Image (tube, helix red, strand yellow):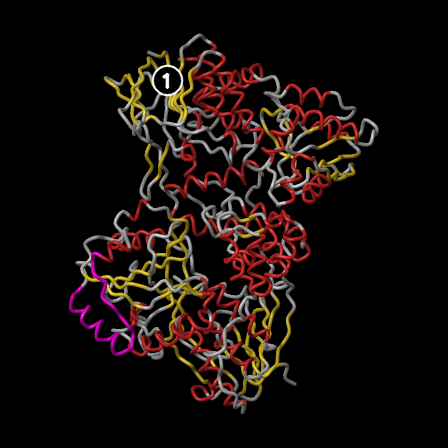
Amino acid sequence: MWDGIIIGGGLAGLTAGIRAAERGKQILIISEGAGSLTYSSGALDFGDVGQLLSHEDHPYALLGETVVHAGMEWFQNLFPDYRGSWSEFQEILTPLGAPRKAGIVPRSHNTEPLKNAKVIILMAPYGLKDFFPEIIKTNLLKAYPQCEVEIFPFRTGTFESWHTIGKPVTGMDYTKYWQSQPGVSELKRLLDSLPQTSGETVILFPGLAAAFCEPLKEVLAGTPFPVIEMTSFPPSACGHNLYSALKQKFKSLGGELLTGTGVQSIESHNKVCSRAIVRSKGRPTAFSADSFILATGGIFGGGIEATADTAQETVLGLPLYVPAQWTNSEFLGEQPYARIGIEADRELRPVGPGGKEVLFKNLRVIGRMLAHWDPWTETCGGGVSLATGWFAGNQL
Amino acid sequence: MKDYQVVIVGGGATGVGILRDLSMRGISALLLEQGDLAHGTSSRFHGLLHSGGRYAVKDPQSAAECIDENLILKKIAPHCISDTGGWFVQTKDDSPGYVEEWIKSCAGAHIPIREVSISEACRKEPLMDKNVLRVFEVPDATVDGFRIVWANARSARHYNGEFRTYHQAERLVTDKGQVTGVAVRNLLNGHQFTVHCDIVVNAAGAWASQLAGSIGIPLDVICDKGTLLAFNQRLFHRVVNRLRPSGDGDIFVPHETITILGTTSQFVDSPEDNDPQQEEVRSLLEIGEQLLPGIMKNRIIRAFSGIRPLHREDHDVPGVKEEGRNVSRSFALIDHELQDGIKGLISIVGGKFTTYRLMAEKVSDRVAEKLGNTTPCHTAEEDLLPEIPEHVYKKAARLLPYAPVEKMLERLQEDAEDVLKEIEQTPHKGQMLCECEMVSMAEVEKAASDEDTHHLADIRRKTRLGMGTCQGAFCTYRALPLLWQKKEKYDSLDEELRNFLNQRWKGIRPVLWGQQLRETELTRAIYSGILQFTEN
């Protein structure tokens, strides 16, 4: 018998699990996949919180400002390698080298040093996949016109045999190497070999992902010039490392993580959920708990499946908010389908149509499963997952 | 003073077919196309190379033309055709009387058919409905519209034929009751100029009436919109037709790893009116379900629509819009000297992709006769493109993974050598920039730097970039540096990317459910989230 079972082990589910486990709860996370952090930039977007709080149905509005704020603070205490601020955006670089705003970011991604730089040295690891130094240089010159940008190509012996056969080296491959012992030594040698210029030089290093890796952070702290990182095209080592760190934190607090299989249904009685039935080739396995959290990741995570006519929640068949029109012609603009999700009360419990009746007393819905928000046009994907996950873990 | 003997307007299959034919006869010709080659109907159809079976009952002449051309194209353009064979399948809803009539008509048109036993049929096409009544095999095949158009253009160029894309024929130029040229606008830089010639061939397809109308000549072309669906799997091994009078959603055409289901028929006002609609998708799926039970469970990657330009001869039919399928699919060659007393203009309208070569031959015969050229047509005998030399095959097989080799050689033909040389020198350019359609970085780079490539969509048509399962999620980003290298001729990267994503989106919107919706979330995560591109 668990205190809580969380279905879904992405950012929201793991956040809820860690928060509850910190409070001494016995938590089981059952996760079919590995979340979608590896497809993300690794930075957490909060969006314009003040404005989003005023959207009546938005998850932020359900929780209120204090809770969103608390979630943000909590995360930074949990992972000091990340930094954010309630009062201002952090600036980081896209994979094409354009500055963008974000909420909480790995410290090494913050572009602050670029603002006073005179020279940017853009490190160009040979064969790095989906990395386009010439375009990045153009974008950097546009954003930081006071700078000169110098592309610094280099190659490491490790991948020479890959280069010979033309095998691409992904950011994940490079990161794995930098985090190894020979990688750390080589990185140190490489940075030492750079021309020793004044303090106005900044090194921009793609494919590094220093957060959570003590030896790497140490090397970077020892350089005479700031070394900053940029986000990468998926799969992103930075997002993946955050996912690993969350998992590790959860387990270190005594949490149990069951991955690779999904929950097919939840048994309930009188609006109280009692057992999660796990999909299995043999006899279905049941796990009991006092409380449940649904964090199955919406459409992308597989928690919502759409057909030509409608959309369904896949575990309990909960009712969904589904807009009449799903799309608009401008792909990069507002797409109403993104707001499909479960409507919930202020405790994040699912409610029936009309919003009055609470459908399950001991079930909370978090992250991308909630209705009435769009992580892309509102750039609040990380914020909503974090705030709702923190809240659900705190209440459990 | 004339610049060319002939100017052809329209870069679809018919236009390039005429360009090739005239060039082989030694007639100097220029083809003008307002977009990219094959951007219109020639790439927006099901890709069926008709055996004639579909027309056997209703239109025996078309059926006979189809089977003849089917055999010719299989011979001269094997690299553009996949000889899958096809079936005509009678379900319990299809009239037995029609089946008998069809069998007789096929014999009349010399279309070879063979009845397939139901047990053999179920074994060979396991996804097909088990309750079908009768199955007949015909020599249907599948054809790659882009590829055959480009093959014709290359062959024509070999015989000194010229073509200019993104050149719009704004109007015909006349002098004393005779067409003497075409006023042209280069859409890339806005330059306007006039090309003088003896004869203009109007092969503008769905746009043909606009061109004729520029000098007040009536040409009644009906725009018949046909919507199709692309599934991301090969659901059938061969073409599968319903054995009944043609209707919506009754033909499945497999291409490489996908299957196309077509086709609706609806009259529209303009050739630009080609947005697939949700209702059309519904109707296709409902009927498709009868041959492929559980069709809704299969992932659809996009819907697309083409405009069939049908010719209606009788101008006097009142405004009632009859159904598109009842208007002849056979083609009409109109010599405006005979019809309207205007010399120097020939229009070719109607017809279908399968008979493009025949149409080109008829037009070219007429043109040659007027010009006093007596060289006969050779397009039915001469291979569309030369054989790829053995050493090129071997080199490609050494440098690239197995599956992409053939695809690349079929697309690039003799240009493959340059791409292979590039990969040999810079091995990482052999990696697959487009992982769905298996297109190497070197090949995309080549397409991006071709002088007749002006937009990301042109690269797509040449390489199939962005046409696979991801519908551009990964490869659009990966093409950016190649556009950047040639930035002087492209729009800004933001703009190219936005336009390309919006074009892909147009076909995804009506089929946005299941795994395709999931894919869309990923695409939005990449472009709106990670790369922070916003709408204009």
Res B65 quadrant in image? bottom left
Image x and y of residue B137, in percent: 27, 65
B313 drawn magenta = no
Figure check: A307 above or below B210: above
Residue B338 relative to residue B279: left or right: right
Residue type highlighted by circle 1: Ile
Residue A295 seen in the figure: no
Label 1, secondary structure: give it: strand
Res A122 quadrant in image? top right
Q: Nearer the viewer, residue A167 or B64?
A: A167
Residue B536 relative to residue A134: left or right: left
Residue B150 seen in the figure: yes
Q: Nearer the viewer, residue B53 or A364?
A: B53
Which residue bears the numbered disc 1? A5
Image x and y of residue A8, in percent: 41, 25
Image x and y of residue B238, in percent: 33, 59
In the rendered picture of this protein, how many numbered marks are placed on residues? Answer: 1
Rate crowding at label 1 as few (under 14), some (14 to 19) or many (20 or more) other CA atoms within 10 Å.
many
Q: Nearer the viewer, residue B52 or B353?
A: B52
Specify the quadrant that holds the N terminus of chain B. bottom right
Magenta stretch, overall SS: helix
Q: Magenta span covers which residues?
A: B95-119
Res B362 quadrant in image? bottom left
Q: Which residue occupies 62% across, 45% down?
A: A166
Figure check: B467 above or below A285: below
Chain ID at mark 1: A
Image x and y of residue B120, in percent: 23, 58
